[in-house]
Image: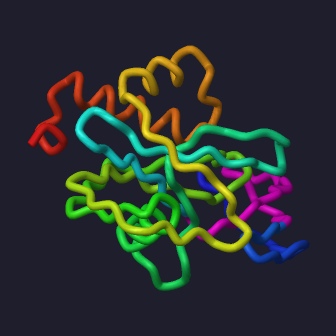
Amino acid sequence: MKETTLKSDVVFKGKILKVKVDRVRLSNGKESIREVVEHPGAVVVIPMLENKVIMVEQYRYPIGKILLELPAGKLDPGETPEECARRELEEETGYKAKRMIYLGKIYTSPGFSSEIIHIFLAEDMEKGENRTDEDELLNVVERDFEDVVKECLNGEIEDAKTIVAILKLWGMKGVGFHEIDN
């Protein structure tokens, strides 16, 4: 089922992403066009303080609304996912984590995008000063973990990466995943 790239044209290159139109050969020998959004990858962090989750409220221009989300951000060139997770956690919330646990990765929309998001659990945190980017305006909020799980399940929380990360952690806790219960 593998597809082979025959031709690739970059039609847009921006600060965050690149858009390509590729001509590919399908495994059945036919040709097709693929429109691809290339993204450098990102992280999402679940910052836990006992039974509380540190979250951010942020206006999202493309959808024109304020969303409740977990801290997250894109990978900088040469940066590992864990380095990015630590940087984003501190920039957006002011917290530093002594313990950062990798919970896995997700592809956000593999039908048209290469974006991968690495999920981290941050524990044993100390409060410092948040240093958000100058074009990033957000409010930091502390929420009860069980309330956040309910809001993910009932549709109040609409951000996909937040829903996946919270429900993944909830499921892992439910089956007694040893790495997060220590």
Front residue (pair 55, 108): 55
At 44% across and 56% down in the image, what residue appears? 118
Front residue (pair 180, 32): 180
Front residue (pair 89, 141): 141
At 38% across and 39% down in the image, what residue appears? 53
Confirm whether the magenta stretch covers residue 32: yes
Name the outermost residue toward the right.
11
Q: How many marks?
A: 0
Q: Is residue 104 above or below residue 14?
A: above
Q: Give the left or right position of residue 99, taking residue 128 as reference.
A: left
Q: Give the left or right position of residue 37, taking residue 46 as reference.
A: right
Q: Is residue 134 above or below residue 121?
A: below
Region rendered in magenta: 21-41
At 47% across and 58% down in the image, what residue appears? 93
In the rendered image, residue 39, in percent from the top left (x then y), is placed at 66, 66
Q: Is residue 17 above or below residue 76?
A: above
Front residue (pair 38, 16): 16
Q: Give the left or right position of residue 18, taking residue 42 as reference.
A: right
In the rendered image, residue 4, in percent from the top left (x then y), is placed at 68, 64
Q: Locate the C terminus by quadrant.
A: top left
Name the outermost residue toward the bottom.
78
Q: Quadrant of residue 137?
A: bottom right
Assign the magenta stretch its main secondary structure.
strand
In the rendered image, residue 57, in percent from the top left (x then y), is placed at 62, 44
- State the scheme by which the image is colored: rainbow
Confirm whether the magenta stretch covers residue 129: no
Q: Quadrant of residue 176?
A: top left
In the rendered image, residue 9, in percent from the top left (x then y), is placed at 86, 75
At 28% across and 44% down in the image, what residue appears? 49
Q: Is residue 144 above or below residue 18?
A: above
